[in-house]
Image: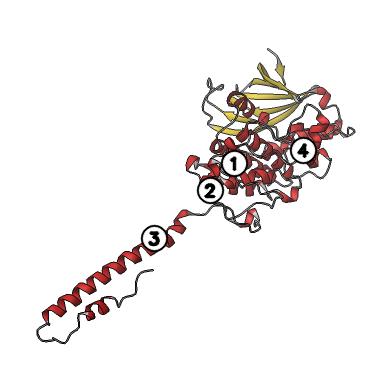
Amino acid sequence: MERIGEYLVKRLVGEGGMGKVYEAEERLSKRRVALKVLRPELTKNEEGRKLFLNEMRILAHLEHPNLVRSLSSIEDGDKLVMVLEYLSGRTLRDELVRRKRLPWAEAVGHIASIAEALAVAHEQSPPIVHRDLKPENVMLVCAEGEEAEGAPKGLKVMDFGVAKVLEAAHATNTQSIGTLQYMSPEQIDAGVIDARADLYALGLVFYELVSGEVPFHSASPRELLNLQCTAEPPELADDVRVGLPRGVETLMFSLLEKDPEKRPASARVVLDTLEPFRSAGEAAPRRRTTGALPKTDTERTSPPSGSATASKREPEAPSPAPRLDTVALVEKNAQAKPSREVPTWAGVLGIVLVSALSFAVTYRLRLSSNERNAASPSATLETAATPSSPR
């Protein structure tokens, strides 16, 4: 049995562009772990090796239910190894291959969980930016033996910090590190990269979960890079938009803004925005949200004329959209009900009062008709008409 450091390798779990992942067992404690062994050619740079060990020490103190826990890191000869908690399950990519696309409510749940993980990492000092967020780096945790199709018990984001290490290891190379279909414009342009680069990737993943495909794709890497930097994401298909809450759709497209300043301010803002929809399912708010995400050139939230979606949603007001982080996104129906019900009760009450008063006056007039022969029949009508009619 192969041995890496103090760990006995049991089997190869997977292999990717950054290295291989093994299931292993700690020799003394018998603890089950996952070992991610980075490819040697990616870690030849001494600065990259130092950064890797430093990043792994930082990640070892980062704990959250939506983050794969980093237990330690080791150097074994020319190998750099990440020691991670072992998880049973499948990646979000596996889920998309199996199901093509997900219902919007399920997609919202996954994106909110990813946003939670991003928020925790981004709020560290200094912030930890993923730089390579994609479905392959998101694990749906399942019971052992149910990895292929079992219902997920949780979601965990993997590989924080790895892309940063690889960039340092390739410091003399002008090529950006990351997956082209999930890279932000600022990564492609070698600009300043901060947490908002992860939010752009989150928008790409969100779009793919809901629609079944990434917004930008091309067989030519150069054309794909150009699309990421300049092209507007295509509108969602009509069958995808049916039932999709406006707040969810607006958020998705705001994450895909080319200018980082126009994206939501943080993963925490994204999470707060999604909260009303997170567990709503088919009962999620269908009404227009009171406000907003960063202003876009095209009104993305107006459904096609005559579509099923259009019949379920009220038209949007043409006023400019306020900032996402200062306005509640969901109108509460309960606030609107009293204004619609008061006129109905007022009308009923008015009719009852008029009828009662008319009866009382008529009865009184009949009792006193012998003593008050001068009373005019029209008095009944005039008296009965005294109360104001209901509005």
Which of the labelled discs sits on residue 91, or is there none? none
Sequence-wise, the earlier of marks 3 and 2 is 2
Structural crowding at the residue carrying mark 1, measured as other residues with C-alpha within 10 Å and reported as few (<14), some (14–19) or many (≥20)? many
Q: Which label is found at residue 313?
A: 2
Disc 1 to disc 4, C-alpha distance: 23 Å
Spatial CA distance of label 3 from label 2 is 22 Å
SS state under label 4:
helix
Q: Amino acid at mark 4?
A: Gln
Q: Which tag is nearer the camera, tag 1 or tag 2?
A: 2
Kindly identify which residue carries mark 3: 341
Give the secondary structure at mark 2.
loop
Tell me which numbered mark, 2 or 4, is placed earlier along the sequence: 4
Residue at the disc numbered 4? 228
Circle 1 is placed at which residue position? Answer: 112
**Residue 369 versus residue 9 in the image, above or below:** below
Left-right relation of 194 to 362: right
Q: Count residues near mark 2 (Cα–Cα under 10 Å), then give few for <14, some for 14-19, many for 20+.
A: some
- The reply to whether dot 1 and dot 4 touch (C-beta < 8 Å) is no
As rendered, which of 50 and 135 lies closer to the eye? 135
* 3 or 4: mark nearer the eye: 3
Whether residues under marks 2 and 4 lie with C-beta atoms below 8 angstroms apart, the answer is: no
Residue 294 locus on image (x, y percent): 68, 52
Q: Secondary structure at mark 3?
A: helix
